Image (cartoon, rainbow, N blue to C red):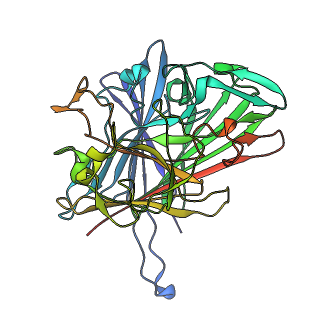
Amino acid sequence: MNKKNYFYALMLAGISYLTIGGCSAPKNEEEKMESKTINFEVKIKEVPVGENTAKVFHLDNGNGMQVEISSFGGVISKLSVPDKDGKSENIVLGYDQIADYDTNDYYFGSAIGRFGNRIAEGKFELDGQSYQLATNDGDNHLHGGLLGFNRVFWDAEYQEGDESMIVKMTYTSPDGEEGYPGNLTTTLTFELTTDNKLLLEFTSETDKPTIVNLTHHGYFNLSGMTEDILGHQLKLYAPKYTPVDENLIPTGELKAVAGTPFDFSTPRLIGERIAQVPGGYDHNYVVKESHSSELVKMATLEHAGSGRVMEVYADSPAVQFYSGNFLDGKVTVNGVTYSQYMGLCLEPQTFPNAPNEPSFPTSRLNPGETYNHKIQYHFSVK
């Protein structure tokens, strides 16, 4: 059984830190079983963001994997995993300072809501009533609007599981925020396991009929940003995708990927056919054509040089593959300029513009129902 955690407070450079350590106690000799030591380390600090304060949680699982999570925006600001030689490096794009996420137009590492991806003209209907959302992507609504879940302060606390570390966050989006109906209360948990998995889970409840499509917007680069992602190898477990118009709104069609540059049903280098896709990849890949609670593998991403492998699992119908087309070189962190294709996103989701496409899996949530969405990232080497 696990020892109780011990807590001690540190004061460093005027910032409060809380460090938590934990390990499992050895079994007694009579049990004659091999014990397992779990070396967790957790550091919690508070940092200013505008006129408010965010909590930042640094989790270390003692197995070469560390993650930094902010209560502002539900941001994963750093994610370090080991390569084939055991060297841990950060593999996600992000800003140097948590305060910089207040102007996060790229959605680096952010929680996305109330509706991930695009809604045409920011309009939809529920039960005969029309709703107009904020439009922040030309004439369209993108990733929850001007003040989405990526730019709000979540209530956050640290918890510890048997063999994992957990950060639990909650946020209540008030009725009418960004034009959405209903008070929507959402819980988001991040769980780092001892075997190098990062598990996310969203749950939401509403007091009025509304729409919900939550996801997470990490930009991954398994090389540790030593090169762009065009040399990464990707497999998507999706036989179809949703074609889009010139504004990246789905046409309503489901099209087979076979015989097209969108076909990643067998592992392919991302840069191999990207020139055949005007603007690059920014498409919804259909893993399931309807909702189910089944957790399925959606993607496998590999980088040969480092040996890193990331597998993405989720219970949503689809995953958005975005190849970092709009990264424009305006952000430089630790000497690395975030130019086009420096990171990629794999965003499990309900289909874009689902409220306006009756044939798409529904994004409706009614009072008395619970929205649930699980996303998992499994890391290994080969």
Q: Quadrant of residue 113?
A: top right
Name the residue rendered at 41%, 72% in the picture: 36
Q: Quadrant of residue 17?
A: top left
Residue 288 vertical placement versus 214 (above, below)? below
Q: Quick check: 225 left or right of 198? A: left
Residue 214 is situated, as x and y percent measured from the top left of the image, at 59, 40
Depth check, front residue: 329 or 174: 329
Q: Quadrant of the C terminus?
A: bottom left
Name the residue rendered at 55%, 20% in the picture: 147
The furthest residue to the front: 259
Depth check, front residue: 372 or 364: 364
Q: Quadrant of residue 93?
A: top left
Q: Quick check: 106 left or right of 156? A: left
Name the residue rendered at 55%, 24% in the picture: 140
Residue 34 vertical placement versus 174 (above, below)? below
Residue 91 is situated, as x and y percent measured from the top left of the image, at 29, 47
Name the residue rendered at 67%, 40% in the picture: 357
